[in-house]
Amino acid sequence: MQQIRTLDVQTYQPHYIHGPNRIWTETNCYVDVVIELIHALGFDPVAALPFTLTVDFEGDQWTFFKYSHQDLFELYGLEIQELNPWENLEAHIEKQIGMGRPVLVELDSYYLPDTAGTTYGSEHVKSTVAVNAISVQEQRLGYFHGQSYYQLQGNDFRNIFQTNGIEHPRILPPYIELVKLHKKPSEITLQETVDKSLLALERQLKYLPNRNPFESFLCSFEKDLPKLKNAGIEHFHQYSFATLRQLGACFELASTYLQWLSINTPLDLQVAVESFLEISKQSKSMQFQLARAVSRDKPVSLATLEAMGNQWQIAQSELQRSLG
């Protein structure tokens, strides 16, 4: 068994970002696995969250937010490189894990047992996992996905890597990244982490939206609402993931980051912390409203989106006051 860290599925403790008291226990497949990977390597994933402040409404979706590769390298010494597959996928993964490099790879969640009750055995959907351990001989895979650490084996292993000679439909090969580890947690002090996080924050603040993104989202939502009501619940789930879930999860992370800064620096960012947290709560409420509107033709209050926009403006004014 080649592995990066010796982990037990039964005893693994996820990072508190994936704790039961969160508004959004999952964010998106890429950010979730990177959070747990950073955590399992012994670093604090919160320090690299300045990117959450820059999300915007992109016209048809909210930013599909991801960690900045530059920030990951500067803060933790994690260098992410694309892996170009030229032989069997499982052979590449085993090689990289054997070299001490975690692998981020898109796999078919139809064969990921942790998705039981959603896509496992029922729907072919690609999802990014972070591989920590693999044995091709024993047909076992240890991986981060969603909120925690899991293992698959046997038929799931054979199916997910197509080692059984059965070719499954696939539009494109999976996107694969390897993670080179240049630092150990013991080599970085808390103060160094805070200082580098502030530098990352300074870089990210240059890319703040130049106008309130909730204004354009409100216009788009109002225009799309009649079509959403007629398209059915499955279309609602796709729309909600691209909009309300992304903005809600991201602003909860932004609140978490600013709270971390308030604890570890002299900065007082509590107003922005509470404003971003309120946006996150309201986006969850809006998601429930929209679900009822689609399934039972109930009304949707656009005032909720207006309130979210007001909270965003309050947070930006507070950031300007505190950080310049």
Image (spheres, helix red, strand yellow):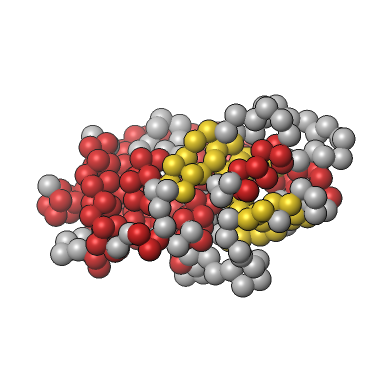
* Count of marks, rendered view: 0
Quarter holding the N terminus is bottom right
Residue in the picture at 39% in, 48% down = 77
- 254 lies left or right of 261: right
Q: Position of residue 196 (x, y in %)?
A: 26, 51
Residue in the picture at 55% in, 47% down = 101
The residue lying furthest to the front in this view is 99
Please tell me which residue lies in front, 310 or 196.
196
Task: Residue 10: name its quadrant.
Answer: bottom right
The residue lying furthest to the bottom in this view is 11
Q: Position of residue 5 (x, y in %)?
A: 57, 60
Please tell me which residue lies in front, 213 or 86.
86
Q: Is residue 249 visible?
A: yes
Q: Position of residue 70 (x, y in %)?
A: 36, 40
Residue in the picture at 31% in, 49% down = 50
- 160 lies left or right of 260: right
Q: Is residue 290 visible?
A: no
Answer above or below: position of 52 versus 86. Answer: below
Residue in the picture at 44% in, 42% down = 79
Q: Position of residue 284 (x, y in %)?
A: 46, 56
Please tell me which residue lies in front, 319 or 303.
319
